[in-house]
Amino acid sequence: MPAHIRRDPDALLIVLTRDGEEPQTRRAIGGEQALLSAISMLTECRYLRTGDMLIVQAADGDAENTADR
């Protein structure tokens, strides 16, 4: 019996990468939730350093596997 996988096109993955640290990832549904999650992640940093990177991308699979790309 074939299985049908439903992918939510609005699912987004937010990845915050800092040198020397494990990337932080959060999954969000829709742009507004993604924006609020990104702001929350940035405020938890207390300060930004050269090389910090925040990426928002379509969530195509497991958050940990996508973050390692």
Image (cartoon, rainbow, N blue to C red):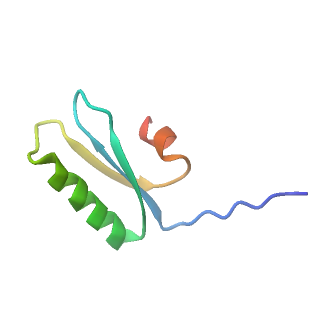
Picture coordinates of residue 6, whole percent (x, y):
67, 64
Q: Residue at x 43, y 60 (%)?
A: 12
Is residue 22 toward the left or the right of residue 13 in the image? left
Quarter of the figure that contains the N terminus: bottom right
Residue 61 screen position, x and y as percent: 56, 49
State the image coordinates of residue 20 (x, y, percent, origin top left). Answer: 23, 27
From the viewer's perspective, tell me whether residue 34 is left or right of residue 12: left
Residue at 11% in and 36% down: 50
| Nearer to me, 58 or 32 | 32
Asked if residue 60 is positioned above or below residue 28 in the image, the reply reads above
Tally of marks:
0
Query: Could you say which quadrant of the image residue 31 lies in?
Result: bottom left
> Residue shown at 33%/38% (left/top)?
23
Task: Pick the quarter of the image with the C terminus.
Answer: top left
- The image shows residue 36 at horizontal and vertical percentages of 27, 66
Q: Is residue 47 above or below residue 31?
A: above
Q: Residue at x 42, y 70 (%)?
A: 30
32 lies left or right of 39: right
